[in-house]
Image (cartoon, grey):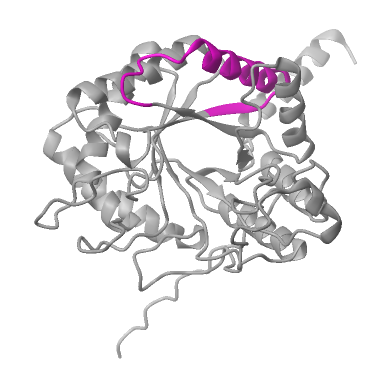
């Protein structure tokens, strides 16, 4: 081909390539776990714990920091553990999420002074851990175990407005460290009673989000309070499948995604805070399994109350796989975190990991890992939306 004709031919190819529509990137979902086992000052041990998560196909790990009144920065020992965990995550290409607890019901940061200290503590963590760009503010503030008081004497919600004030101040403190920090709010429980006269005062996520939006509007704030919402979508028991719906109750499950999006839209419509388009993280989804006899040596507290809702590993695997598939097909859901990577040795706590307490794998590990990896590279498929029937013409 003559040189001039060859140049014309190449130019035509480049023109066609530029004119061709670019293919949209595949939908992906981050799959990880809420697991603080890597929070140890020994970097080698922290790396081994993080390696276990990678072995399960997980790419995001949430660890917890415990704030208490008077703390404005982590202690030397705490910081050593956070740094070891962050280094392990960085070496394994795992995204590390830091959830900062508010100290439980007896330590709730209600006063302006306490809120300032909590925000300063969280910002100090962000300054000391440049690898960590994701921070969760609080833990289940709609439950009295973690946030008190829930109601005033007239039965009005005190928890949501107080949490909104804390979230706003912490948001500003974290953004002052770096505008690239992802501030995650909520961490709400999927259920609550909404009864002020109950012995255990709690709010449902439906009521809590409504009141959070009302408090935000009342504050007249012109900037957001969160970049993402996290909810803990546990089933009523481990026997409850992730497909369970709650159309006539105030509870929220993974399958109740349309209801959750509507709640966010209603709570924040017309404000500076994103509502319906706000990214969602499903944190702490766990299904407990029965421990085989030959593995009991790795566990303790045999005299304690054992979980009555345990299921087989086959069912756990099926539920975890289905949870991944559901979350993957929900447009604004960014990730799903299991609770935990490995079982807690104490039989009075949670045995919902993909590994036993001795870190050997459960039989469903391969099934869950395969689903997690498929979600994270975007090869899962979602059912096509059914077309709406055309309205009939009146004759």
Measured as percent of width and height from the top left, residue 163 is found at: 27, 38
Measured as percent of width and height from the top left, residue 11 is found at: 72, 18
Examine the image and state in which quarter residue 200 appears: bottom left
Measured as percent of width and height from the top left, residue 343 is found at: 69, 47
Is 279 positioned to the left or the right of 25 in the image?
left
Question: In the rendered image, is residue 224 in sight?
Answer: no
Q: Nearer the viewer, residue 111 or 131?
A: 111
Q: Work out whether 345 lies above or below 93.
A: below
Q: Which residues are magenta?
A: 68-97
Question: In the rendered image, is residue 7 in sight?
Answer: yes
Q: Residue at x 61, y 19 (%)?
A: 86
Q: Nearer the viewer, residue 9 or 316?
A: 316
Q: Residue at x 36, y 18 (%)?
A: 71
Q: For residue 89: magenta?
A: yes
Q: Residue at x 79, y 54 (%)?
A: 296
Examine the image and state in which quarter residue 20 appears: top right
> Where does the C terminus fall, quadrant-wise?
bottom left
């Amino acid at each position: 081909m003559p040189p001039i004709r060859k140049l014309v031919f190449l130019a035509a190819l480049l023109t066609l390539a530029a004119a061709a529509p670019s293919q949209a990137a595949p939908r992906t979902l981050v799959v990880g776990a809420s697991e603080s086992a890597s929070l140890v000052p020994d970097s080698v041990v922290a790396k081994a714990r993080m390696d276990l998560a990678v072995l399960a196909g997980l790419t995001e790990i949430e660890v917890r920091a415990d704030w208490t009144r008077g703390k404005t920065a982590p202690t030397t020992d705490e910081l050593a553990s956070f740094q070891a965990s962050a280094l392990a995550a960085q070496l394994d290409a795992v995204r590390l999420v830091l959830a900062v607890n508010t100290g439980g019901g007896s330590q709730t940061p209600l006063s302006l002074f306490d809120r300032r200290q909590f925000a300063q503590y969280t910002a100090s963590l962000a300054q000391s851990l440049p690898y960590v760009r994701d921070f969760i503010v609080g833990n289940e503030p709609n439950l009295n175990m973690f946030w008190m008081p829930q109601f005033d004497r007239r039965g009005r919600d005190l928890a949501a407005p107080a949490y909104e004030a804390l979230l706003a101040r912490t948001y500003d403190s974290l953004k002052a460290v770096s505008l690239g920090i992802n501030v995650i709010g909520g961490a709400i429980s999927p259920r609550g009673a909404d009864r002020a006269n109950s012995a255990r005062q709690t709010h449902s996520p439906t009521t809590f989000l409504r009141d959070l939006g009302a408090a935000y509007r009342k504050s007249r704030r012109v900037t957001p309070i969160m970049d993402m919402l996290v909810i803990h979508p546990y089933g009523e028991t481990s026997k409850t499948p992730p497909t369970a719906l709650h159309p006539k109750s105030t509870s929220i499950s993974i399958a109740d995604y349309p209801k959750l999006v509507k709640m966010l839209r209603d709570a924040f419509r017309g404000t500076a805070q994103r509502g319906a388009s706000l990214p969602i993280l499903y944190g702490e989804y766990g299904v407990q399994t029965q421990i085989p006899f030959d593995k009991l040596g790795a566990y303790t507290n045999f005299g304690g109350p054992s979980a009555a809702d345990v299921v087989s590993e086959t069912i756990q695997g099926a539920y975890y796989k289905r949870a991944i598939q559901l979350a993957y097909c929900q447009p604004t859901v960014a990730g799903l975190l299991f609770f935990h990577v490995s079982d807690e040795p104490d039989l009075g706590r949670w045995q919902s990991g993909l590994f036993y307490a001795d870190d050997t794998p459960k039989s469903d590990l391969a099934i869950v890992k395969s689903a997690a990896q498929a979600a994270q590279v975007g090869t899962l498929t979602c059912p096509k939306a059914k077309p709406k029937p055309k309205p009939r013409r009146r004759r």
